[in-house]
């Protein structure tokens, strides 16, 4: 398999192998984890397996296609990508498909598939911020010319996402701040924005509570309940969020060291998002703690290889972009694990490459494709340098 990958796929072979293994394993895990979805929405496991397989095919095609492109084109298109993300988020806000009062999805006509606009916006923002950090690297001390042009896109994208998906907006905001810190943005400016953001959020919450008819934050009660139920009323299992969290912890406990076996997990059938937001709990129940340790190692190796590519690049845009993508993928996996183990309150973050969900998988694979495009350029640079020395 490695020789076949080397022939058609360029870049870091370790990243390719880990990504392909995770995508292949997702077929088995999704098929095993969808009984609850079959009960709730009907159909058969094969229906959801086939749908997931179609998404994998699209994701691999997108990953392969973009890894053949020169990273400089991604840099040049960053502004178009960013404005497209804003347009998609605004469209979703007014015309998106709503689930639990959250309008996050856009239904693709004719094919019956859905796309979560925030998944595209996350990658778009990382690309754009990386580009701006490179362009404005000499102006970081200037509010008007340097800091505000970088900070404004972050606030706009996160502001459009936070209304329907607080956890995604918070994670994306923190990743953006990490990039700003790595880009040597003065700490005083970062602190000022954090303080201003906290005050603004408090004001918005105050307006929402004072004028509830405006419904400025339609999911505010959900956010509060998830937090308080997790940390104050953990014994109250009547709340839906607590019920899911307790079932997830029970599934992990029953998994033990070696797991219940493929398809033999029972608690997963009572976790509504066993195939996505609570993937890690279902995984441990059926495959065990030892397999979970290997899964964590896979993600850590993936992060290490991406960071290695980032630090080897002679282009700051490529360095920031690789770091942003690596941190994004690992943070999503880490949050999923921490939610399932009771460290975090319930959020909507799934496991990259493994959980059922088309747009998240496609965007994760696009991110890997971009990293591999950068790695391929590094390989070509080494080849040219070697040939020059030998000549």
Image: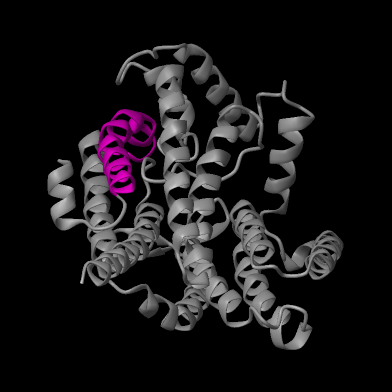
Residue at 85%, 60% (x, y): give it.
202
Residue 14 included in the magenta stretch of the image: yes
Residue at 69%, 39% (x, y): give it.
226
Image quarter where the N terminus lies is top left
Give the image location of residue 289, x and y in percent. 46, 18
The image shows residue 129, relative to residue 229, as above or below, that is: below
- Tell me which corner region of the image, top left, top right, bottom left or bottom right, holds residue 155: bottom right
**342 left or right, relative to 64:** right
Residue at 35%, 64% (x, y): give it.
378
What range of the chain is rendered magenta? 13-42
In this view, the residue in front, 91 or 358, is 358
In this view, the residue in front, 128 or 119, is 128
Give the image location of residue 277, x and y in percent. 49, 40
The image shows residue 25, relative to residue 259, as above or below, that is: below
Residue 104 included in the magenta stretch of the image: no
**147 left or right, relative to 89:** right
Q: Is residue 269 visible?
A: no
The image shows residue 87, relative to residue 108, as above or below, that is: below
């Amino acid at each position: 398999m490695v020789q076949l990958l080397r022939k058609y796929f360029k870049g870091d072979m370790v990243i390719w192998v880990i990504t392909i293994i995770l995508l292949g394993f997702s077929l088995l895990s999704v098929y095993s984890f969808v009984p609850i979805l079959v009960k709730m929405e009907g159909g058969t496991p094969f229906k959801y397996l086939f749908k997931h397989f179609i998404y994998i095919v699209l994701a691999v095609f997108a990953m392969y296609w973009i890894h053949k492109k020169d990273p400089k084109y991604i840099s040049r298109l960053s502004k178009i990508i960013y404005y497209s993300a804003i347009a998609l988020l605004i469209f979703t806000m007014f015309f998106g498909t709503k689930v639990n009062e959250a309008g996050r999805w856009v239904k693709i006509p004719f094919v019956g598939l859905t796309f979560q606009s925030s998944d595209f916006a996350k990658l778009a923002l990382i690309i754009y911020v990386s580009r701006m950090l490179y362009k404005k690297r000499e102006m970081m001390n200037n509010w008007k010319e340097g800091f505000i042009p970088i900070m404004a896109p972050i606030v706009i994208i996160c502001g459009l996402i936070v209304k329907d998906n607080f956890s995604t907006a918070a994670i994306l905001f923190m990743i953006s701040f990490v990039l700003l810190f790595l880009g040597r943005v003065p700490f005083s400016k970062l602190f000022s924005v954090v303080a201003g953001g906290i005050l603004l959020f408090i004001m918005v919450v105050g307006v929402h509570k004072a004028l509830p008819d405006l419904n400025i934050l339609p999911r505010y009660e959900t956010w509060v309940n998830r937090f308080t139920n997790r940390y104050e009323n953990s014994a109250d299992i009547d709340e839906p969020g607590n019920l899911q969290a307790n079932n997830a912890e029970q599934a992990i406990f029953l998994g033990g060291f070696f797991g219940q076996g493929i398809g033999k997990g029972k608690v997963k059938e009572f976790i509504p998002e066993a195939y996505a937001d609570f993937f890690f709990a279902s995984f441990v129940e059926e495959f065990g703690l030892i397999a979970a340790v290997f899964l964590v190692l896979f993600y850590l190796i993936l992060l290490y290889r991406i960071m290695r590519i980032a630090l080897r690049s002679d282009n700051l845009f490529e360095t920031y972009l690789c770091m942003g993508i690596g941190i994004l993928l690992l943070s999503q996996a880490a949050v999923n694990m921490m939610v399932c183990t009771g460290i975090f309150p319930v959020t909507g973050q799934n496991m990259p490459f493994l959980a059922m969900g088309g747009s998240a998988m496609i965007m994760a694979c696009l991110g890997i494709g971009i990293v591999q495009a950068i790695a391929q350029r590094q390989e070509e640079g080494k080849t040219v340098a070697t040939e020059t020395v030998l000549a």
